Amino acid sequence: MRKRLIVSAAAGALALLLTVPASAAPYTPGTPGIGDAYYPNAGNGGYDVSHYDIRLKYQPATDELEGTATILATATQDLSRFDLDFVLGVKEVLVNGRTATFAATGESELEITPARPLAKGSPVTVVVRYAGKPGEVERGGYSAWLRTADGGVAANEPEGSAWWYPSNDHPTDKATFDVSVLVPDGTQAISNGILTGQSSRAGWTRYNWRQTKPQATYLATLAIGKFDIRTDTTPGGLPVVTAYSKDLGDNDGAARASVERTGELVDWLSGYFGEYPFASVGGYVPEVPTGYALETQTQIFYSPAQFSRGANTSVVVHELAHQWYGDSVSVQRWSDIWLNEGFARYAQWLWSEHENEGTAQELADYVYASYPAGHAFWTVKPGDPGADHQFAGAVYDRGAVAIQALRNTVGDEAFFRILKGWPAERKYGNATIQQFQAFAERVSGKPLGALFETWLFTAAKPAADSAGVPATSAAPAGATGLAPSAESGRPEPKSWKRIQETNAVHEHEQGRAQGHAHGRAR
Ligand code: ARG
Ligand code: ZN
């Protein structure tokens, strides 16, 4: 191991002598993290990925996953070495066609030393051959591969990718994806985008999926199992792919009655957010015990639990809203999560209003009144919740109240121009909350610093006379329950319970979002 590194370092030094002027800065290793304070090891430094080609074979009976990932990247510094984020066993790595040395380091790092160093700006092709049983690979007692009776699913945030493909696992490095999966006949494989081909030979079927628009790594998904896959097009010509596990039992009807409305709901949301940014849309419902959904790009992951009390179009609206707010425009750092969850929640409030189940203002009033000033709810700052609270209820609900406060401050006309203008302004990119604030100030012509500070960056309940405060006054004393209730003295909007089911997930179910922050932060 040590010897190999020395040999490759010597080869690297030789290549350096031959190709680089003596005055050039030395080639250095890329950092093992991209610099996100919430997840110091997430992503990597030194290169930028443009495309992932992921070729897999999966055997549901044994959970054996074999893969070859071909990664197209560009070096962004003179690189002697770089990392990928990955947890499965690696058999071989090639960099630009030459065998590279590699080592598993840290919790989920694959450290790769190419035979020849990589000059800044040069194209890099990395091939990683690997195999493993993803359901058995745990980090901090957690596996991101959700095993099902007939296969498994990778869908989690902020991490899940490392259980099925090696990547630069951070939302700031987006890429296009081709995912090709070989499974036994009778089993289906689902990933993002369009199903471009399907062919059977000798008892195995290959499914080819293609995502042609830039996609963050956590928004790539893989599901294997027995699915009923349906393809359709919206009246506007957008391809729709939906899939349902054949094991949904009593939830089957409600799941279909919700997810089959994807085309209608994407058209409705386009009225608020502008043109839909991707080339297809859809969703799938595997038979998993989890309670959350995930806005996996164009191919949304839903949990059957969300349909266990009947149809739930609200969760479909939430995940579809993320296609604009989260997927096309992604967080710059994970602390910017309000740009995803606040707006996806607010879309549910707009849908509630449309369905006559409570207006956005009524929902904001209800949230505001439900939690008294001393309640822990107000200690989470939606604008910087911390990795431990990245998906806390306050990021969603206080986050959406913040958006109502913005609406009340700038007025409907400017507000809806902001809501539609932002996804166009930052299409396929990344952004911070500060950049959103600057955009909203530019569109509305109003200074919004105090509003953002009060609603997003203060660990206390905003005073009743704060800018944009909801119509109601402070909650009556005695409302101390964790969940909002009749104690608040305000009527519960009809849509309230359905909306809350979007995150019918206990904090401990959040896995990495929780355990990981402890494991990884210094
Ligand atoms: N972004 C997801 C949503 O739509 C939340 C995922 C939370 N992750 C988790 N493992 N519970 O709300
Ligand atoms: Zn969400």
Image (spheres, rainbow, N blue to C red):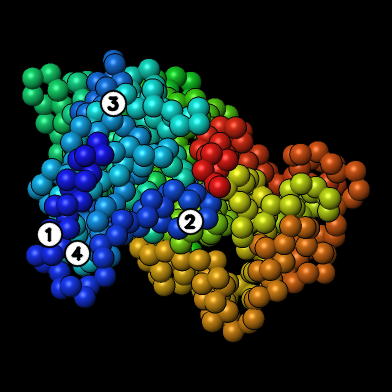
* Label 1, label 3: how far apart the Cα atoms are: 35 Å
Left or right: residue 225 compared with residue 346: left
Q: Quadrant of residue 13?
A: bottom left
| Kind of residue at badge 1 | Ala
**Residue at the spot x=35%, y=27% of the render?**
134
| Kind of residue at badge 2 | Asp
Q: Position of residue 487 (x, y in %)?
A: 85, 42
Name the residue carrying label 3: 132
* Label 1, label 4: how far apart the Cα atoms are: 11 Å
- Foreground residue, 380 or 237? 380
Name the residue carrying label 4: 119
Name the residue carrying label 2: 36
Of mark 1 and mark 3, the one earlier in the sequence is 1
Of mark 4 and mark 2, the one earlier in the sequence is 2
**Residue at the spot x=74%, y=52% of the render?**
379
- Which secondary structure, mark 3? strand
* Label 3, label 4: how far apart the Cα atoms are: 33 Å
- Foreground residue, 10 or 460? 10
Of mark 3 and mark 2, the one earlier in the sequence is 2
Of mark 1 and mark 2, the one earlier in the sequence is 1
- Which secondary structure, mark 2? loop
Of mark 1 and mark 4, the one earlier in the sequence is 1
Quadrant where the N terminus sits is top left
Q: Position of residue 104 (x, y in %)?
A: 32, 37
| Kind of residue at badge 4 | Ala
Q: Position of residue 483 (x, y in %)?
A: 74, 39
Name the residue carrying label 1: 15
Left or right: residue 299 compared with residue 486: left
| Kind of residue at badge 3 | Gly
- Foreground residue, 118 or 237? 118
